[in-house]
Image: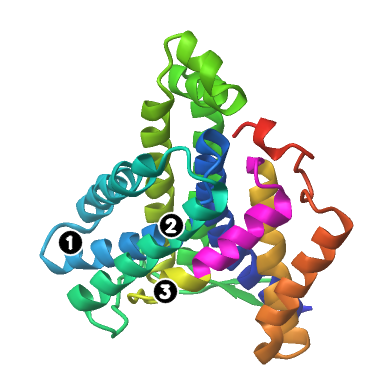
C-alpha cells in the first residue's frame, strides 16, 4: 500500500504539471481557435529564466515574480510576429507555424543556456514529509497548489472580469464581439500572454524537481496537449482531469508494469479514450463553442 500511495503522489505531481500546461493550450484555443504547439517552450523559458535571474543574484521570490511577465512578453511576441500576420490561414498552416516557432525558441535557448540541465533551488526546504509510508516533498505540494491557483484564477478571470467576458464573446462569435466594441485582436494578444504566464508557472514549479534544459518543454508540451485533447480541448475542467489522469496512469504504469513503457501506457490510454469519445471526456462535439 505504501508503494501504491507513493506512485499516486508521484502521479498527482506530474499530472498537475500536465494539467497546467494543458490549461495553457485551452486558454489560447478557446479565444483564437489556434493550437499553439510552442506552449511547451513557455514552460522551458519559465524554468530557464528563473534559473538565470536567481543565479544573477536576485532574491528568489523576486526572480519568481519577475519571470512571469518576462515570459508573457515572449507569448505576446509570438502572437504579434507569427500568428497575427497569418490571420485567415487554415488551421494546419497555423499549427506548422507554431511548430516552427517552437523549434526556433528551442534553438536559441540551446545557444544561450547550453545543453546542460540547470539546477534550480526548491521554493522552500525540501525535506521529505512521511505520510502513510509514502514520501512527499514540499515541492510536490507546491506544484499541486500552483495548479489549484491557476484553475481558480482562470475561473475568476473568465467568469468575474470584463476581460473574461471578452474572451467568451470572441470564442462564441468574433464578428459579433467586434460589433460590440470588443477587439478580437486584443483578446488574442492577451490570451497568448496569459497562456505564456501559465506556462511560466508550470516551468518554475517543476524546475526544482526536473532540472530545466533547453529541450525540456518538448515532452511536457506533448503531454500537456495530450491532456487537453483527452479532457476536451475547449474545457478547463477537462484539461485538469486529463492532466491528472495521464500523470496517474504514467506513474502507476511505470511502478507496477515497466518504467520503460510509461509513455506508451499513458498515450495508449489517451488513444483508447479518444476512440470511444473523439471530442474528449468533457469536450463538446463543437469544441469551439466551449469557453475557458
In this picture, residue 44 sits left or right of residue 283: left
Q: Nearer the viewer, mark 2 or mark 3?
A: 2
The verdict on residue 17 being magenta is no
Q: Which mark is residue 53?
A: 1
Residue 229 appears at what percent x and percent y? 68, 54
CA distance for labels 2 and 3 = 17 Å
The residue beneath circle 2 is: 98
In this picture, residue 247 sits left or right of residue 65: right
In this picture, residue 231 sits left or right of residue 160: right
Q: Which mark is residue 216?
A: 3
Task: Specify which label sits upstream in the sequence, 3 or 1.
Answer: 1
CB under 8 Å between discs 3 and 1: no
Highlighted range, magenta: 220-236
User: Farthest right residue?
Assistant: 276
Residue at left offset 34%, top offset 77%: 213
Q: Callout 1 environment at 10 Å: few (<14), some (14 to 19), or many (20+)?
A: some
Task: Specify which label sits upstream in the sequence, 2 or 3.
Answer: 2
Q: How is the image coloured?
A: rainbow
Residue at left offset 49%, top offset 35%: 153
**Relative to 141, is 121 above or below?**
below
Q: Name the secondary structure under disc 2.
A: helix
The picture quadrant where one finds residue 106 is: bottom left
The picture quadrant where one finds residue 69 is: top left
Amino acid at each position: 500500500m505504501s508503494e501504491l500511495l507513493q506512485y499516486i503522489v508521484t502521479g498527482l505531481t506530474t499530472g498537475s504539471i500536465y494539467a497546467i500546461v494543458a490549461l495553457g493550450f485551452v486558454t489560447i484555443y478557446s479565444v483564437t481557435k489556434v493550437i499553439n504547439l510552442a506552449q511547451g517552450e513557455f514552460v522551458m523559458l519559465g524554468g530557464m529564466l528563473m534559473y538565470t535571474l536567481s543565479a544573477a543574484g536576485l532574491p528568489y521570490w523576486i526572480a519568481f515574480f519577475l519571470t512571469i511577465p518576462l515570459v508573457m512578453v515572449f507569448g505576446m511576441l509570438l502572437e504579434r510576429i507569427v500568428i497575427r500576420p497569418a490571420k485567415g490561414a487554415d488551421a494546419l498552416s497555423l499549427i506548422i507555424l507554431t511548430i516552427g516557432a517552437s523549434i526556433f525558441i528551442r534553438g536559441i535557448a540551446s545557444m544561450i543556456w547550453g545543453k546542460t540541465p540547470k539546477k534550480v533551488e526548491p521554493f522552500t526546504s525540501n525535506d521529505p514529509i512521511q505520510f502513510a509510508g509514502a514520501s512527499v516533498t514540499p515541492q510536490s505540494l507546491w506544484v499541486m497548489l500552483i495548479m489549484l491557483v491557476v484553475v481558480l484564477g482562470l475561473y475568476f478571470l473568465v467568469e468575474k472580469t470584463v476581460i473574461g467576458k471578452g474572451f467568451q464573446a470572441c470564442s462564441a462569435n468574433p464578428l459579433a464581439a467586434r460589433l460590440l466594441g470588443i477587439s478580437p485582436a486584443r483578446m488574442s494578444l492577451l490570451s497568448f500572454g496569459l497562456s505564456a504566464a501559465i506556462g511560466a508557472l508550470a516551468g518554475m514549479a517543476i524546475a526544482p524537481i526536473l532540472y530545466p534544459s533547453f529541450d525540456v518543454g518538448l515532452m511536457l508540451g506533448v503531454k500537456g496537449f495530450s491532456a487537453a485533447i483527452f479532457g476536451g480541448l475547449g474545457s478547463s475542467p477537462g484539461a485538469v482531469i486529463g492532466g491528472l489522469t495521464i500523470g496517474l496512469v504514467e506513474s502507476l504504469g511505470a511502478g507496477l508494469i515497466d518504467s520503460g513503457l510509461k509513455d506508451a501506457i499513458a498515450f495508449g490510454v489517451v488513444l483508447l479514450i479518444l476512440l470511444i469519445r473523439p471530442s474528449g471526456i468533457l469536450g463538446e462535439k463543437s469544441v469551439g463553442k466551449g469557453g475557458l
